[in-house]
Amino acid sequence: MQNAPIAFVTTRWSRVRRAGEPERGEAHDALASLCQDYWRPLYHFARRQGRSPEEAQDSTQEFLCELLERDFFARADQERGRFRSYLVSAFRKFMSSEQRDRSALKRGGGQVIVSLEAEAEMGRLPELSDDVTPEWHYDRSWAQTLLERVFVRLREEYERAGRGELHGRLLPHLSGSGQRQASYAQLAAALGRSESAIASALHRMRQRYGELLRAEIAETVLTPEEAEDELRHLLRVLAR
């Protein structure tokens, strides 16, 4: 994957960390977007902590609503860490001190971060060995959620450019594992292109995928160095 220049100053996490007047509204919107992205990892973390599906849903929903209502990250400038680590640390503390009623009204006054009906059980938890910690499962869910978002962005870009068919044909080959399914010659014949054109198109797709992946990671860190560390961590989590 090629390194692409990324502007870190205006990332969502940067805006959250700088929460306060006159940027309060912008920071709130950035935090709401990040909370949406991290609903599933937090839910899986709660489940691995022994919570039932209903309890995990309630804990995750209440925690995120509380963050939004209380401007939790307005003090984040004095904290250090990536959004992924910062959030799970705060959630762990929240669950350990959870001693309140969970009526629908109290869970955000009707504010819904994610539809519980649509996200019930969040695709269920995979079978994992006993040595897998809740923190590791949180990171695994974070990595999968991030990759899903990258794939969606990649597909949308190709569709907007009128190259949806090309995207669909090349996608199985993105990681290289798809070459067993069809040769470049077969792809070239199906798409009416030369084999060299197919190879070039696949190279460009892989390059763009890498750029989008780094851009997504950059949204939750403050420096290029942290982005590279997060990328390495993501690859380690997925490789396990």
Image (cartoon, rainbow, N blue to C red):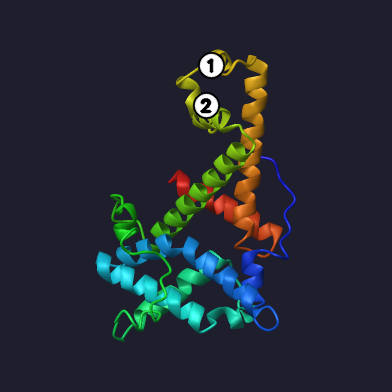
Q: Percent from the top left, x then y, of residue 37?
A: 49, 61
Report the residue at 47% width, 57% height from top: 142
Task: Specify the label residue 190 is tagged with.
Answer: 1
Q: Quadrant of the N terminus?
A: top right
Q: Tell me the distance, in whole angstroms, between the alpha carbons under discs 2 and 1.
A: 9 Å
For residue 181, say whether it is visible.
yes
Q: Residue furthest bottom?
A: 100
Bin the neighbour count of mark 2 within 10 Å (Cα to Cα): few under 14, some 14-19, many 20 and up: some
Q: Quadrant of residue 6?
A: bottom right
Describe residue 125's horizontal placement relative to residue 84 as left or right: left
Q: Nearer the viewer, residue 42 or 36?
A: 36
Instruction: Specify the amino acid type for callout 2.
Output: Arg
Sequence-wise, the earlier of marks 2 and 1 is 2
Describe residue 134's horizontal placement relative to residue 31 as left or right: left
Marks 2 and 1 in Cβ contact (< 8 Å): yes
Describe residue 54's horizontal placement relative to residue 80 as left or right: left
Query: Residue at label 2?
Result: 169
For residue 229, say whether it is visible.
no
Q: Secondary structure at mark 1?
A: helix
Q: Percent from the top left, x then y, of residue 200?
A: 67, 25
Q: Nearer the viewer, residue 72 or 80?
A: 72
Q: Secondary structure at mark 2?
A: helix
Q: Percent from the top left, x then y, of residue 100?
A: 31, 86
Report the residue at 42% width, 79% height from top: 93
Bin the neighbour count of mark 1 within 10 Å (Cα to Cα): few under 14, some 14-19, many 20 and up: few
Q: Nearer the viewer, residue 170 or 115?
A: 115
